Amino acid sequence: MGKIQIVEIHSGSSGWERMTHVLFDFFGTLVDYAPGDAEEGFRKALKLLPGDSDFDVAQTLWNSAWETHEAEAQETLREYSMDNIAGSFLEQLTGGPPPEDLTHSFGECYMSEWSKGVRYLDGVDGMVERLSNCFHLAVITNTHNPSLVPNHLKWMGVADYFQLVVTSVEFGRRKPDQAIFEHTLDCLEAAPDACVYVGDTFEADYVGARRAGLRPFLIDPEKKHGVPPGDRLASILELEDVLKK
């Protein structure tokens, strides 16, 4: 990694700030994504189970497990894992606690199909490399699988440019909880006002980062949210020019 420079960025209400770190959301920010064929992933995962399962009944139980965990997570901001979902589903389907290896394999099979919807954006790899010469880089992402984002960063060829990847499933809390931002800053030994945070979700990314004292940018090409114009990006690829200015 090259020499880290101190870059000054005008942030409107806070005046000129000295920035040393750039932190990113992952899904919808560093990559584009649309969920892959979830039904096909579920069908493949069902084949791991002994015997035959009624697909419609199984799918109803699977959806119910997702809805139950997601409703609780939205209320408490405690994150859940794919193992949690798969375990709840399999217990309902079979009437007893499933083996841990089967639970994990079921979730991994489902996620491998879902992950096919992740699309790498042209130019992001070069942008990340150039930014790494001026800033410390890190990722803070909500995800149900601890290896999913690190693996994609490796496949993109940019993993080595990031000092840290913090996932909600490993930390236990999801954005917009301030705690996940504060934990990341503690690990980086960075002050909030020395950090830029870029994401595409208003509440989780923009509001969460702002509450934690970071300088937020929101990817909002359709101008859906009432953020100051200087805080809005049409694309992640605009970030480099904004930081230069």
Image (cartoon, rainbow, N blue to C red):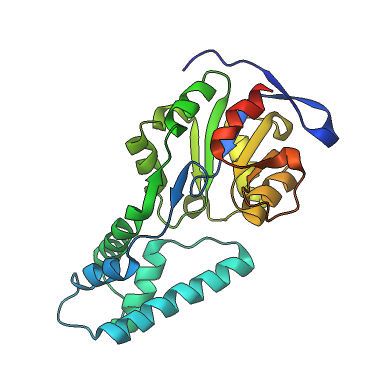
Q: Is residue 237 left or right of residue 35?
A: right
Q: Is residue 48 visible?
A: yes
**Residue 90, how many percent across, how many down?**
31, 76
The x, y position of residue 183, in whole percent, is 61, 42
Residue at the image position 40 percent from the left and 54 percent from the top: 145
Quadrant position of residue 18 = top right
Residue projecting furthest to the top: 3
What is the x, y in percent for residue 161? 45, 27
Does 82 appear above or below 57?
above
Front residue of 87/59: it is 59
On-image quarter of the C terminus: top right
Q: Is residue 85 above or below residue 23?
A: below
Residue at x 71%, y 35% (from the top left corner):
192
State which quadrant residue 98 falls in.
bottom left
**Place of residue 33 in the rendered image (x, y in percent of width and height, measured from the top left):** 43, 52
Compared to residue 150, the image places residue 226 above or below, namely below
The quarter of the picture where residue 117 lies is: bottom left
State how many labels appear: 0
